[in-house]
Amino acid sequence: MYKYFNKYLDNNEVILKVIYQAKFFLFLKLFFLLLVFLLDFFLMIPIFNLGRWGIVFFFLILLFCVFSAIRIYRQSLYNALVITDNYIHSFYHNGILDRVVEEFKMDNIQKIEIIYLNWFLSFLKIGDISIFLKNENELIFENITSPQRLKRYIQELVI
């Protein structure tokens, strides 16, 4: 089930919880790609009137939309915060091919803050969680649904 994450964990680690980013932003990005995709079809005749370059432009837009949708979906599967019995792992994409995995022990957590960016996201209960470590590093995981519940869950595990 967690094929992306198991290869980065030790053999004796047990995954307690996996937190993904809010699906609201995934759907929003895919919606805008769908608009570009449909706009390409609505403007097909004027684009095709440009001749050979219009046809090339039309298919480039289609390829851009398809590959962008695949990339966005795969990133949404990979960007996660994985809580195990001893560690918290942060998995995220940093560009097209660069995948980053950060991990730290539960004992190193000093403080957890929740950041709501605006009233609309606060209404949807979507916010960022910022975990401060004892060595003055900070881990920020953005766009989480119900960050208050996650904060309580991590605090229960630390205590």
Image (cartoon, rainbow, N blue to C red):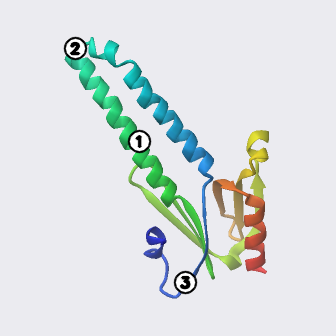
State the residue at coordinates (76%, 48%): 116
User: Going by the image, does 2 lie left or right of 17?
Assistant: left
State the residue at coordinates (72%, 72%): 109
- Circle 2 packing at 10 Å, graded few (<14), some (14-19), many (20+), is few
Q: Earlier in the sequence, mark 1 or mark 3?
A: 3
Relative image position of residue 28 (x, y in whole percent):
57, 40
Q: CA distance from mark 2 to mark 3?
A: 59 Å
Contact between marks 2 and 3 (CB within 8 A): the answer is no
User: Going by the image, does 23 lie left or right of 73?
Assistant: right
Identify residue type, mark 3. Glu
- Circle 3 packing at 10 Å, graded few (<14), some (14-19), many (20+), is few
Residue that label 3 marks: 13
Element type where label 3 sits in the image? loop
Residue that label 1 marks: 68
Q: Quadrant of residue 149?
A: bottom right
Contact between marks 2 and 1 (CB within 8 A): the answer is no
Q: Earlier in the sequence, mark 2 or mark 3?
A: 3
Q: CA distance from mark 2 to mark 1?
A: 26 Å
Identify residue type, mark 2. Gly
Q: Earlier in the sequence, mark 2 or mark 1?
A: 2
- Mark 2 or mark 3, whichever is nearer to me: 2
Could you say which disc has been placed on residue 88 in the image? none
Relative image position of residue 132 (x, y in whole percent):
72, 64
Relative image position of residue 11 (x, y in whole percent):
47, 86
Q: Is residue 118 visible?
A: no
Quadrant for the C terminus in the image: bottom right
State the residue at coordinates (69%, 55%): 145
Residue that label 2 marks: 51
Element type where label 2 sits in the image? loop
- Circle 1 packing at 10 Å, graded few (<14), some (14-19), many (20+), is some
Relative image position of residue 129 (x, y in whole percent):
71, 58
